[in-house]
Image (spheres, grey):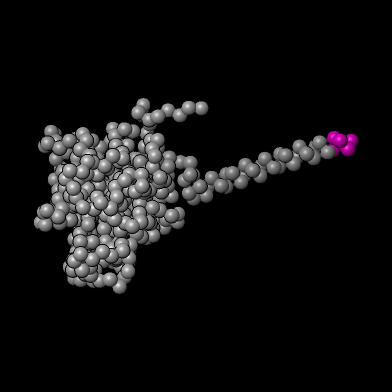
C-alpha cells in the first residue's frame, strides 16, 4: 500500500512537472524577441561599406553629420570600436580588407609611401572570399591611390580611384561616380564595367576630413565643410540605391581607420610633423536585418568588418581571419547560402 501510494505520488509529480515545463516553454516563446537566436531570415543582397578617416564619434553625435547621426540613431552603433595600433592608413585598410593584423598581412608602415614597383598585397581579401563562396561581386571607390596595391585586379572586382593626384575629386564627386556606375551596370551591356548588376558589396572611402584637418586644423571652417561634404555624399549614395530599387535589400556599415589626433589639444599638424592617431572609431550598421535603436555592447575591432559582411550576406568560408562577425547587430540569423566551393566538414 505504501509502495503504491509512493509510485502514484511520483507519477503525479512527474506529470505536474511536465505541465509546468510546457507552460514555461510556451511563455518563453511568447516573449518578444525570444526567437531571435533561432529564427532566420533572407540575408542582405547588398552591403555598402563606408570607410572614414579623421572623424571622431563626438562629431557625429554632436549633429555635424546629420545623415550619419540618423543611421546611428535608427540602426545599431558603437562609438568605441578599435582600429589597429598604430592606426596607419594603409595598414589599417589592409586589416579591414583581410581580417588580419599587420604581422599577418605584412602591410607595414613602409606602405604608407606609395611605391609603383611594389607588388600587390598577398593576403586574400573579403572580395576574394565572397567570390569563392558564392561568386559575389564588389565595386570599390577609393580616394587614395595607395590603396590600389591592396585591391588586386580581378574579374569580380570593379574599382575606381581618385585621390591626391586629382584634387577636383571630392566626396560628392565619388557619389556621382557611384550613381553613374549603378545606372550603367543595371542596364544592358555594362558599358565596359566588369559587373552586370548592383554589386553585393560596394566599398567607398572618404579620407577628406583627415586631410583637411591635418592641413587647415581640426577646428577650422574647412574641416566643418569637409564633414558636411562627406555626409552629403553618404546621403546621395543612399538615394542612388533607392533610385535603382535596392535600398530595402541593402545594409550600410560605416566605420573608420582612425579618428584624427589622439591628443584633442592638437588643432593642426605642421608640415612634416607626425602625431599619434586615435584608434577609437565608430561602427554604425543600418538597413536590412539590422536591429533598430541598438547600442552594441560587445567589443568590436576593425578586423571584424569583413566577417560581419560575410555573415550578413549568408556566407560561410574557412578563413585565417583573426576576427568575428558582430552578430548582435542582426534582428535574426541570416539564412546560410551554401555552395560546392566551401570546404566540407569532416566528422
Is 72 left or right of 225, judged from the image as shown?
right
Residue 219 at what x, y percent from top left?
A: 23, 71
Is 127 left or right of 311, judged from the image as shown?
left
Residue 275 at what x, y percent from top left?
A: 28, 65
Q: Nearer the viewer, residue 347 or 24?
A: 347
- Judge whether residue 2 is colored magenta: yes
Q: Nearer the viewer, residue 165 or 255?
A: 165
The part of the chain drawn in magenta is 1-5
Q: Residue at x 29, y 55 (%)?
A: 88
Q: Residue at x 72, y 39 (%)?
A: 14
Residue 213 at what x, y percent from top left?
A: 22, 66
The answer to whether residue 158 shows anywhere in this view is yes
Against 248, residue 72 (above or below) is below
* Quadrant in which residue 228 is drawn: bottom left
The answer to whether residue 312 shows anywhere in this view is no
| Quadrant in the picture for the N terminus | top right
Q: Residue at x 13, y 45 (%)?
A: 180
Is 239 left or right of 17, judged from the image as shown?
left
- Judge whether residue 256 is colored magenta: no
Number of numbered callouts drawn:
0
Q: Main secondary structure of the magenta part?
A: helix
Amino acid at each position: 500500500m505504501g509502495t503504491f501510494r509512493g509510485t502514484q505520488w511520483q507519477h503525479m509529480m512527474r506529470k505536474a512537472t511536465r505541465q509546468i515545463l510546457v507552460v514555461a516553454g510556451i511563455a518563453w516563446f511568447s516573449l518578444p524577441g525570444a526567437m531571435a537566436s533561432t529564427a532566420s531570415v533572407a540575408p542582405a543582397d547588398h552591403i555598402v561599406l563606408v570607410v572614414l578617416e579623421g572623424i571622431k564619434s563626438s562629431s557625429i553625435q554632436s549633429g555635424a553629420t546629420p545623415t550619419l547621426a540618423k543611421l546611428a540613431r535608427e540602426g545599431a552603433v558603437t562609438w568605441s570600436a578599435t582600429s589597429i595600433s598604430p592606426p596607419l592608413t594603409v595598414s589599417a585598410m589592409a586589416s579591414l580588407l583581410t581580417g588580419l593584423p599587420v604581422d599577418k598581412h605584412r602591410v607595414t608602415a613602409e606602405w604608407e609611401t606609395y611605391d609603383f614597383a611594389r607588388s600587390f598585397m598577398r593576403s586574400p581579401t573579403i572580395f576574394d572570399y565572397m567570390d569563392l563562396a558564392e561568386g559575389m561581386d564588389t565595386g570599390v571607390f577609393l580616394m587614395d591611390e595607395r590603396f590600389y596595391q591592396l585591391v588586386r585586379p580581378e574579374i569580380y572586382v570593379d574599382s575606381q580611384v581618385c585621390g591626391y593626384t586629382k584634387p577636383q575629386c571630392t566626396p560628392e564627386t565619388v557619389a556621382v561616380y557611384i550613381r553613374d556606375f549603378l545606372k550603367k551596370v543595371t542596364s544592358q551591356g555594362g558599358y565596359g564595367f566588369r559587373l552586370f548588376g548592383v554589386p553585393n558589396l560596394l566599398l567607398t572611402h572618404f579620407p577628406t576630413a583627415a586631410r583637411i584637418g591635418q592641413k587647415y586644423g581640426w577646428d577650422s571652417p574647412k574641416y566643418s565643410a569637409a564633414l558636411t561634404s562627406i555626409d552629403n555624399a553618404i546621403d546621395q549614395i543612399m538615394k542612388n540605391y533607392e533610385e535603382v530599387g535596392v535600398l530595402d535589400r541593402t545594409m550600410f556599415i560605416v566605420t573608420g581607420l582612425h579618428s584624427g589626433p589622439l591628443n584633442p589639444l592638437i588643432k593642426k599638424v605642421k608640415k612634416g610633423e607626425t602625431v599619434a592617431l586615435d584608434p577609437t572609431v565608430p561602427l554604425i550598421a543600418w538597413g536590412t536585418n539590422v536591429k533598430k535603436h541598438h547600442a552594441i555592447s560587445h567589443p568590436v575591432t576593425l578586423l571584424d568588418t569583413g566577417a560581419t559582411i560575410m555573415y550578413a550576406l549568408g556566407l560561410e568560408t574557412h578563413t585565417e581571419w583573426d576576427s568575428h562577425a558582430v552578430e548582435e547587430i542582426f534582428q535574426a540569423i541570416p539564412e546560410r547560402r551554401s555552395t560546392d566551393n566551401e570546404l566540407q566538414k569532416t566528422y
